[in-house]
């Protein structure tokens, strides 16, 4: 699992590489389109569409 909780930016290449190694990625901000975890990507746009997940 990969989660962001910082206001600091992570370079896109590093974030994309980390996403590929993770099963689930959760972030309060938008993630790069190339961020493709194995199972689930929850970022600002997904949470805006779903409201929440249980």
Image (spheres, rainbow, N blue to C red):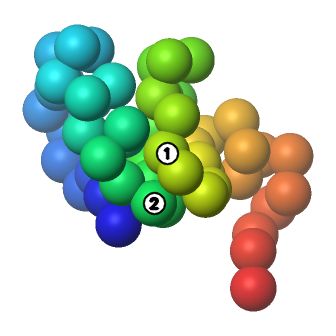
Instruction: For label 2, count other residues whose C-alpha is less than 10 Å away and answer few (under 14), some (14-19) or many (20+).
Output: some
Q: CA distance from mark 1 to mark 2?
A: 5 Å
Q: Is residue 13 above or below residue 16?
A: above
The quadrant of the picture occupied by the N terminus is bottom left
| Rendered image quadrant of residue 5 | bottom left
Q: Residue drawn 13% across and 32% down?
A: 8
Per the image, the residue denoted by label 2 is 23
Whichever of callouts 1 and 2 sits on the residue coming sooner in the sequence is 2
Whole-percent x, y for residue 9 in the image: 18, 25
Q: Is residue 9 left or right of residue 21?
A: left
Whole-percent x, y for residue 23 in the image: 45, 60
Whole-percent x, y for residue 16 in the image: 33, 25
Q: How many marks?
A: 2
Q: Is residue 52 left or right of residue 25?
A: right
Per the image, the residue denoted by label 1 is 37
Q: Residue drawn 56% across and 17% down?
A: 33
Q: Is residue 4 above or below residue 7?
A: below
The quadrant of the picture occupied by the C terminus is bottom right
Answer yes or no: is residue 31 visible: yes
Q: Is residue 48 above or below residue 14?
A: below
- Say which of 43 and 22 sits in front: 22
Q: Is residue 3 left or right of residue 7?
A: right
- Say which of 34 and 49 sits in front: 34
Q: Is residue 36 above or below residue 22?
A: above
Q: Residue drawn 71% across and 52% down?
A: 47
Q: Residue drawn 75% across and 69% down?
A: 52
Answer yes or no: is residue 3 visible: no
Contact check, label 1 and label 2, Cβ < 8 Å = yes
Which element is circle 2 on?
A: loop
Q: Is residue 34 left or right of residue 19?
A: right
């Amino acid at each position: 699992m990969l989660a962001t909780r910082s206001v600091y930016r992570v370079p896109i290449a590093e974030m994309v590489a980390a996403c590929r190694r993770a099963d689930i990625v959760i972030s309060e901000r938008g993630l790069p389109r190339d961020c493709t975890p194995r199972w689930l990507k929850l970022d600002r746009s997904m949470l805006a569409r779903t409201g929440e997940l249980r």
